[in-house]
Each structure stands twice: as C-alpha cells, then as structure tokens.
Image (tube, helix red, strand yellow):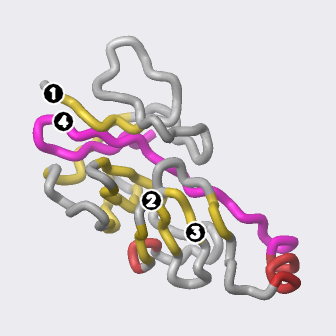
Amino acid sequence: MQARGVHRHDVPQAGSLGMMCPEASTAGRQTMGEWKPVGPETVLADGEMKEVQVDEVSILLAQVEGNYYATQSLCPHLQTRLAIGTLDGFVLTCRAHRSQFDVRDGRNLAWIPKLPRLARRIAQAMKQPEDLRTYATRVQDGQVWVEIG
C-alpha cells in the first residue's frame, strides 16, 4: 500500500501512513476516527472543490497544489453551502457574506468583510467568527480518503 498526502492536524502516531501537512495547526481539528473513501484521486482537478457525503457527514473536499483538504461543508455564519462559494489558492470564500477561510486548517481569515466596520462589530457581538472544522485526508491506492471521527 502506498499512501501520500496525509493531512492531519495532530501529532503523528507511530506507523502512520503518509506525511504531515506542513501548514497544519490545531484550529478546527477533528479527532481521530475512521478513514472513509470519497472517490478516485482524480475526483477533483487542482483548484477545484465539491461537496461530498461521507456516511452522515457532509464535507467540502478541495484540491490545492496537488493536495486534498476537507472541511465542514456549511459556513458557520448562516449555514450556507460553501461549495457554491469560490476557491482561490487556499482561500475559500463563502458566497453569502464573503467570509473567508483557509482550507488547510479551517482558520477564519475574514469574517463578513463587506459589512461596514460598525455593522461588523455589531454582528460580531451577536455571533463570534468561527473556524471551520477540518478532517484529515490522504491519497492511497488511487483513492482519496477522509478521516471521520
């Protein structure tokens, strides 16, 4: 078995397959769970993203610079489907309010940035910006796998 591109946001375990994602952090970290296949390694071209269903979990899968990344599929602000947003490099932009997230670790980069400063402060007082939940990914035996916990 050959594995590559494991993107885990925690400390690697002895004997784990693949490599750690160098940009990984603990923001939005998903605990260790069960690995599930989501499609062939050609499921997405570089720079593409799509929503996939894994068991009962809806996930946004993205490929950037040859690596796969997986996050929750809904924006934490108003639960808008992130797959209808845009992906520019590692930056995922929600279509509803233009909030931006880094697909590598789920970090919130900009929260409803188009609102005027005062309106944004009021909105933040009502609902704090949140990071996206992320899931570890790997490519093994020609398949993309996501760790669901």
Would you identify the image quadrant in which residue 33 lies?
Answer: top left
- Tell me how far mark 3 sits from mark 4, CA to CA: 30 Å
According to the picture, the residue beneath numbered tag 2 turns out to be 90
Whether tag 1 and tag 4 are in contact, CB under 8 A, the answer is yes
The image quadrant where one finds the C terminus is top left
Q: CA distance from mark 1 to mark 3?
A: 34 Å
Residue 99, numbered label: none
Query: Between disc 2 and disc 4, whose residue precedes?
Result: 2
- Secondary structure beneath disc 2? loop
* Residue depicted at x 83% and y 82%: 117
| Residue that carries the numbered disc 1 in the rendered image | 2
Instruction: Examine the rendered structure and indicate whether residue 62 appears above or below residue 24.
Output: below
Give the residue type at disc 1: Gln
Does residue 135 sit above or below 80 in this rendering? above
Local packing at callout 2 (Cα closer than 10 Å; few below 14, some 14-19, many 20+) is: some
Left or right: 88, with 133 as reference point: left
- The magenta stretch spans which residues? 124-149
Residue to which mark 4 is pinned: 140
Q: Amino acid at mark 4?
A: Gln
Residue nearer the viewer, 95 or 117: 117
| Number of numbered discs on residues | 4
- Nearer to us of marks 2 and 4 is 2
Counting residues from the N terminus, which is met first, the one under dot 3 or under dot 4?
A: 3
**Cα separation between marks 2 and 1:** 26 Å
Question: In the rendered image, which residue does mark 3 sit on?
Answer: 100
